[in-house]
């Protein structure tokens, strides 16, 4: 789905314009915040391989695929410490992980480029919320030619809920798009409409249980969800109400 476009170009946080995109006011009241790894880019297999390399070099126990899926969480530095990397060695381990990941073939999720251009062209505020390092996100942005449509980019995020609450007032309608159940729960508490993303149908029930209103495999499904009438969606309760519930 593509939204009609006319008017001024979208400005990124750095003040640049998203090349080739023009905006109207179709989604001027809408904000979408995206997780990065596993949502905009697909890299789970590469992340596992990179972590295995880092741990093996230090003589630490590596994780099987199932354990990796359960335990892998960003920020990376906190995960490395939990897995036995000495605190003083964490910065070097993070650099090794990023370098190993850069050598692999991370992919842009199907439909991501067209989806982002369409949403930006319709006037939506677009942002990134990620526990990944700034250098890793910048590398992916350049290497995968992700459209430069971002109004905000927050990396190295440790407290997802706090950040989502801080951004919530930007636009009247707000969506969070991600692949992690914990992040989707935070989005629901913060007053966002959560949309789950996964490559594995078996993960869909967990994402729905975490509050996802929709679970999609490709981002080209997202514009139609965002454009649907509000009455067609289940709206989360206000953040304060949820936070005060026993």
Image (cartoon, rainbow, N blue to C red):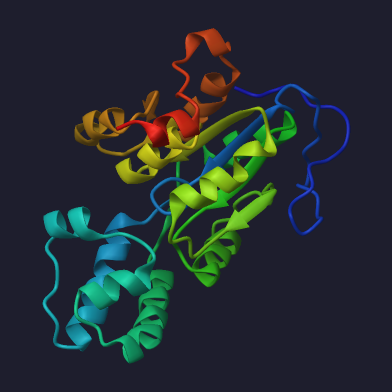
Q: Position of residue 201 (x, y in %)?
A: 24, 31
Q: Is residue 234 above or below residue 102?
A: above
Q: Quadrant of the C terminus?
A: top left
Quarter where residue 6 is shown: top right
Which of the two residues, 111 or 202, is positioned nearer the viewer here?
A: 202
Residue at (25, 68) in percent of width and height: 49
The N terminus, quarter of image: top right
Q: How many marks?
A: 0
In the displayed structure, does residue 112 sit left or right of residue 15?
left
Q: Closest to the observer: 139 or 90?
A: 90
Choose between 179 and 148: the one closer to the eye. 179
- The x, y position of residue 240, in whole percent, is 48, 33
Q: Is residue 205 visible?
A: yes
Say which residue appears at 33% left-offset and 71% top-offset.
78
Residue lying at 45% horizontally and 44% vertically, measured from the top left: 109
| Left or right: residue 22 compared with residue 182 | right
Q: Quadrant of residue 45?
A: bottom left
Q: Is residue 127 above or below residue 82?
A: above
Q: Is residue 75 above or below residue 112?
A: below
Spot the residue most to the right: 7
- Determine the residue positioned at 21% across, 87% down: 57
Q: Position of residue 134 (x, y in %)?
A: 55, 68
Instruction: Give the x, y percent position of residue 68.
Output: 19, 60
């Amino acid at each position: 789905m593509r939204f009609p476009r006319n008017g001024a170009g979208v400005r990124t946080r750095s003040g640049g314009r998203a090349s080739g995109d023009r905006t109207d006011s179709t989604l001027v009241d809408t904000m979408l915040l995206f997780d990065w790894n596993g949502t905009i880019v697909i890299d789970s297999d590469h992340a596992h391989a990179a972590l295995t390399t880092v741990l093996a070099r230090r003589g630490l126990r590596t994780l099987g695929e199932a354990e990796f899926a359960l335990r892998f969480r960003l920020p990376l530095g906190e995960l490395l410490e939990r897995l036995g990397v000495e605190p003083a060695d964490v910065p070097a381990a993070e650099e090794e992980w990023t370098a190993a990941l850069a050598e692999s073939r991370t992919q842009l999720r199907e439909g991501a480029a067209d989806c982002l251009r369409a949403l930006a062209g319709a006037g939506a505020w677009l942002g990134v919320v990620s526990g990944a390092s700034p250098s890793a996100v910048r590398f992916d942005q350049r290497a995968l030619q992700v459209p430069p449509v971002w109004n905000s980019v927050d990396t190295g995020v440790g407290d997802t809920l706090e950040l989502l609450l801080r951004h919530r007032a930007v636009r009247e309608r707000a969506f969070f798009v991600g692949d992690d159940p914990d992040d989707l729960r935070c989005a629901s508490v913060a007053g966002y409409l959560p949309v789950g993303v996964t490559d594995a149908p078996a993960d869909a029930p967990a994402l729905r249980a975490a509050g996802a209103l929709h679970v999609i495999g490709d981002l080209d499904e997202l514009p139609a969800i965002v454009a649907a009438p509000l009455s067609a969606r289940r709206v989360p309760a206000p953040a304060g109400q949820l936070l005060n519930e026993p």
